[in-house]
Amino acid sequence: MPRKLTREDAARLFEMLSRIDPAPTTELSYRDPYTLVVAVALSAQATDVGVNKATAKLFPVADTPKKMIALGEQKLGEHIKTIGLWRNKAKNVIALSQMLIDEYNGQVPQDRDSLEKLPGVGRKTANVVMNVAFGQPTIAVDTHIFRVSNRTGLAPGKTPLIVELGLEKIIPSEYLQHAHHWLILHGRYVCKARTPECWRCEISDICQFRDKSAAPGAKQPAVKMAGRSRLRSGENRGVKGKTAARAD
Ligand code: SF4
């Protein structure tokens, strides 16, 4: 487990990320709170690019709860069948559209409790909608944020909720609004799941990840080489058949 970052470290980390991209935003295409709810509900275990491809044709015909109900589950399914778990997602989008009409006058509610009552909307989706559509400083811990928070030592934790609460505690208030997107984009493009690109990472000097990667073709960092030398010299002979635990 890496050393947990201090509040000063966290402030420096977000200062760096904010300099790279001062106004980050979601990569999902949407028009308003309703289409954002639909896009986020469709994005579970799917890529933003894949969801955007489907919604580029879906939203021109159904961008309100009423139009979605009129479209119906079967036709909605045809629009989204390139997306994983599409059958279940089609059911949920129709059910949540109906609930919005029945209970919220066709509007998307702004509070967590109401959002989480919508079919197919969990804590993560509610956090995204509250942040992106309504400007609330929430953090939706997805796979990228979970990984970056654990690797760097920013907010280590075994569950998304522990990481979310840890992030809320350590992130300086002035960075909370955009923290969500900075961490997602950093995880998606630099601190990648299989091989983090530490050699070009702007927050490498703050990050506590122990197994930082070197640029392709370059020698591994000294720490890693030292570890390998010890193994070669038989210092760790007592540990048979084990490799260093990975963070992902
Ligand atoms: S140094 Fe490596 S592990 Fe740490 S945040 Fe950057 S890419 Fe991720």
Image: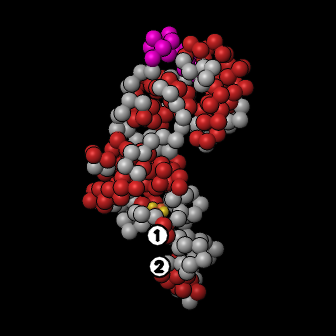
Residue at 56% in and 21% down = 63
Q: Which residue corresponds to mark 1?
A: 210
Residue carrying label 2: 223
State whether residue 196 appears in this view.
Answer: yes
> Which region is colored magenta?
93-107
Whether 33 is drawn above or below 137: the answer is: above
In the displayed structure image, the side of residue 90 where residue 135 appears, left or right = left
User: What amino acid is labelled 2 in the image?
Assistant: Val
Q: Are marks 1 and 2 in contact (CB under 8 Å)?
A: yes
Q: Is residue 53 above or below residue 117?
A: below
Predominant SS of the magenta segment: helix
Residue 122 falls left or right of residue 77: left
Residue 163 appears in the picture as rendered: no
Above or below for 24 versus 212: above
Mark 1 neighbour class, 10 Å CA radius: few under 14, some 14 to 19, many 20 or more: some
Lower sequence index among marks 1 and 2? 1
